Image (spheres, coloured by chain):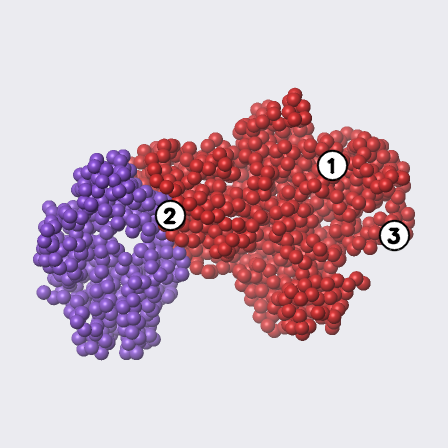
Chain colours: A purple, B red
Amino acid sequence: MEKPLTKNIDFNRRPLNLKDYEKAGGYQSVKKVLKELGPKQVQQIVKDSNLKGRGGAGFGTGMKWGFVPMGDDAPKPKYLVCNADEMEPGTFKDRLLLEGDPHQLIEGMIVSAYAIQATTAYIFLRWAYKVSASLLEKSIAEAYEAGYLGKNILGSGYNLDMHLHTSVGRYMCGEETGLLNALEGKRAQPRVKPPFPQVCGLFGKPTIVNNVETLSNIPHIVNNGAAWFKGLSLSDEGGTKLYGVSGKVKKPGAWELPLGVTGRELIFEHAGGMQDGVKFKGALPGGASTDFLIEEHLDAKMDFSSLQKFGSRLGTGTMIILDDKTCPVGMLHNMQHFFAQESCGWCTPCRDGLPWVEKILKSIEDGKGKMEDLDTLSFHTHYLGPGNTFCALAPGAMEPLQSSLKYFKDDYEKHIKEQRCPWK
Amino acid sequence: MEVKKVKINVDGKNYEVDSSMNLLDACLSLGFDLPYFCWHPAMGSVGACRQCAVKSFKDNKDQKGKLVMACLEQVKDGARFSIIDNEAKEMRSNVIQWLMTNHPHDCPVCDEGGECHLQDMTVMTGHDYRKFRFNKRTYRNQYLGPFVNHEMNRCIQCYRCVRFYRDYADGRDFDSFAAHNHVYFGRAEDGALENEFSGNLIEVCPTGVFTDKTLKKHYTRKWDLTTAPSICHNCSLGCNIIAGERYGILRRILSRYNSQVNGYFLCDRGRFGYEYVNSNNRITKPLWNRKGSSGPLPASSSEVLNEAGKIISESKNIIGIGSPHASVESNFILQRLVGEKNFYNGISGSESQLVSLVIDILKKGPAYSPSMHDVEQSDAVLILGEDLTNTAPMMALAVRQSVKQKRNKIAQKLNIPAWQDAAVKEASQEERGPLFVAGYYPSKLDEIATETYYAAPPDIARFGFSIANIINKEAGTANDISNELKNSTKNIAEILLNADNPVIISGTSSKNKEVMEAGANVAWALCKAGKKAGLSFIVKESNSMGVSMLENKNLNDAINSAKGDQQDTLFILKNDLYSRENKKTIDDFIQNFKNIIVLDSFENPTTKIADIVIPVGTFAESNGTIVNNEGRAQRYYKVFIPRASDVKESWRWLNEIVNVSGKEEFRDLNSFYDFTKFISETIPIFKEIDKITPPPGFRIAGQKIPREPHRFSGRTAMNANLNVSEPKPPDDPDSALTFTMEGYRGEPPSSIIPFFWSPGWNSVQSINKYQIEVGGPLHGGDPGKRLIEPGNNDFNFFDPSSNYFKGKDGELFLLPVYHIFGSDELSNMSPAIQERIPKPYILLNEEFLKKENLKEGDDIKLELDNEKIKLPVKSNKNIPEGIAGYPVGLPGITFYDLPLWCKVGEAK
């Protein structure tokens, strides 16, 4: 099984420096696109590959790039931004790529920037990823020295500057438009779409924001072609995926697998199954902002379209497992505390609704819950939906809540009837 | 300009709306009661509060629809929406529920109660019972200065305050802090808000977070106030205000919407400078310094009336001095009382000539006099010699909006509509339209100027003349412009010529007529080039224009005419002569008179030398017509009848004196409107002033317009301490308003709106109901009428002067420096304003100070007008060497008729 994303990664040694990375076949795609392909052609390859954004939304990358105005009359400068602000609870796949093979990201960014004719690129990195920060700084400097960044790259006439920007630390900076505002030095608040960043993005100019994993796929797609990429997956969405599992499993971790493996394979094969003494109860397939899957869903393909049939979504593909010895209400409270705290404070439902949800969950956990609380939680799951709030933070927060109310209602009611947490 | 319309369907009915609007604009303009918080007609939509949720349907088969925010929906042809949809109603009610989780139950003790937008929206959405049973978040409050009170617990995080303060008014010392439900709006540290328009936070905030601190000192509920449409008297812009009174005390000033003049806002001098009306300095009884008495003593009205009448009828020569802050009517009656040739407008000589020049320029030239709304819409502005932020603050705010017009053009290219506030700003970043500022000292507008030029007034004039000459050779050239300046003037001329609505702003502040003539030349040259150029002049006082239209002869002329001859009588109307001329000059002047009669509201040096002092009402206690800098005649109405019964309107006192002194002229004129009408019929320039508001006989369904809302309380008990019987409410024969709450309940004509209110809309948001379309003109047109329209193209350019400024060794050229708090006589008497007035100082160039071995704060000794003065220095790198900035009007600052050369004494 081919593992293009992780083939260079070995955590028993330091990540490859530029020379070794080149020896392993690195930066070939940069040479290829600058010498043989025009930007539109690169866009077409990526479109054909059916690469879906790996940041969680699963929007077609090639299609996203297609909205960038091209040609001599297009507004300048254009920007490519890598969203490396991985803060979705349970998600650590980008960290693996950043700490494992920083040059892969840089190569992917150069090719992607070329495809949209961006001349400045930013890596917006989570504040806590200090190891990644120093690796990226070093790698960017190496790339400049080797002539892969800067003016007139490889004599092609194409210029690209790349900067590393470390965030100050809010979850909202991982939201595409919140990131752009933070990068501009403004409050990390999202923006209304339309206008879309492709039209009015960083500093009001056309901008593409892509996830680390998405960009890391680009060199391989360009080198091997769209058909090859599609062939890697088990569904009609192309490529491999970095899946992760955390929770009370025997071998929590992350693995590059064909896109479309089942949850059962992921948990019981790769993660070694549940620890002794605990049973599988449910799983959030793609980080905290996704809906629970239960036992009966574990044979579904873990890709962007299949999970929607079961009321969930792939998200980042890093699973959080709920076992039967862990209180679901406590788990929800933990997550809602996170979401309430990370609310940027701009729109009313998120800013004032999430703390209410959190307080109710705490109250239920503390044995002070009332049956009406479940109605309040329920109406929040309805009214904090997409479109009612300004961005996707609150709707994401409601996903685990609404599915927990669907599948674990008995557990909530037990807390309330017994006026205590039965798991304590 | 043809407005494109689209057809939308709201709850089953079709409506035609302006295609450029968003759905919230459209619904409010159609009269729907759709709740909102974060949207503001002057600031566009941001979609933060989620209060304006409505249902959007794909087509007429779509039964489910989806919730959208009306403020972010562009109206499109064929779009279908529902306001009354149950899910939309529930969403709107939920938003209130969420806001209420933290909102304190302060209503009974909150100043905002009764005019609170949150109260209104809560009732409108129908949210009632509280399900939230947890604790609320609380905040610490900050001291923000003497104007605005801070009570953060009430905040519903609508972000209007930061958007107004930072985005609209360009303030920097106020911001949003923290995140999630701890978002905080305040300063980095406690301290007075620095922005000159901070008071608008009071009206922009939908709850009681920001409230009027001056009102708090004598708090009254909105429904308990007696209010009338009035005009601010604290500068020449004539912003429309609503003044509210109770128990004989003026309580507060609110903005009165006028889309042409001040829009929704006011400056802090106008909003908080009213308390002088309640001052202890008020003269409440006539004073008579009888022969043989120890000084002026209280006398009865009839006594002084008779005495005044006797004096007038026996006077062979009499001089009448009018006032640039008294009404046209009062000045007119005085003029006729003393005889036209004996009447003087009361403005100091050097200034009066400049005001007359303004009127002359506007009359004869082709450039129109722009309203502040016109200035906002301008796409290129040139300012010559005016520190607008301090001499005409709301005009500075208008200029700040004008440089933002460019943003809309940039956003338009990306198909971003103008109302999508955040996206417009994002697309245009820091781009600003052209603004050129030439001043003799640095001003706050410099921070947004494309180019600034600091020079003494004569050089500013030459700068302006050069620009005019480049635009049109017929406007002659000034000599000796440096090459560097030549590039500047060429650039500016080009930009003005490429603009669609260029505006030139100058004024009398620099006390230099050539600066003003240069401004005129530029505007006229642009007109000749086919441009619709605006030419605006700032003058000093609220009725400088009006009284100058009546009479050109000024205070200086009066002083000269009195020299030598012994005069009988000096009659002064609302004018402290010692604030307009040197003490010695006035001391000498008054020696010439046997009798001095003064009509004024406050004790001042002039009332102290009077033989008879007659107590007259302030702007809040009189009706009047005044003319603002634009030339717009506007009517202000009496808010209340003073409790001191001897205090009457100046026009009424003057009319009584006329009657008692045997003048035949005004036999048939008795009420206020009689005079307005008479003036409009006899003086051509005032032809329209009788039509700017409805006459006193105006009725709607047989009813007058009440000054008090229908919930006004306490009428029967109010005077019980004086007399247990309830007095008959006083009549108001001078206007179509009543002093009660009885009267027509509906919408009055725009010029006679005493308060904004509509069923369900108790707060200032009710203004929406009075406008044709939200954010636009009021029903029936905005109040006021411009009296001067451009002349034909048959005029001559002014000859450019060849004067240039040359410093003198050992001397400094003193020029006036102005302060929003401190340079205005009337507002200086208000306690809140007094807290913000700076201490006396003198502004000097930093190089000059280095040469004199002086550092900031040291005293410098100066000799001027044969007097020696000492002032602490303030250093600045932009004020030209050889010039000193003298802060006029500050308490502790002696009056000098600037500009003036002074000798530099030994410095410390």
Amino acid carrying mark 3 in the image: Lys
Q: Is the residue under label 2 in contact with that under label 3 (CB below 8 Å)?
A: no
Q: What element carries label 1?
A: loop
- Residue at the limit of the structure toward the top, as seen here: B725
> The disc numbered 2 marks a residue on which chain?
B
Relative to the observer, which residue lies in front, B112 or B581?
B112
* Sooner in the amino-acid sequence: mark 3 or mark 1: 1
3D distance between C-alphas at marks 3 and 2: 73 Å
Report the residue at 64% width, 36% height from top: B249
Q: Nearer the viewer, mark 3 or mark 1?
A: 1
Q: Position of residue B836 (x, y in %)?
A: 61, 52
Amino acid carrying mark 2 in the image: Asn
Q: Where is residue B597 in the image (x, y as percent from the top left)?
A: 82, 41
Mark 2 lies on residue: B181
Q: How crowded is mark 3: few (under 14 residues within 10 Å), some or many (20 or more)?
A: few
Relative to the observer, which residue lies in front, B384 or B780?
B384
Relative to the observer, which residue lies in front, A131 or B363?
A131
Q: Quadrant of residue B817?
A: bottom right
Q: Is residue B902 left or right of residue B881?
A: right
Are tags 3 and 2 found on a single chain? yes
Q: Where A161 sits versus A406, above or below? A: below
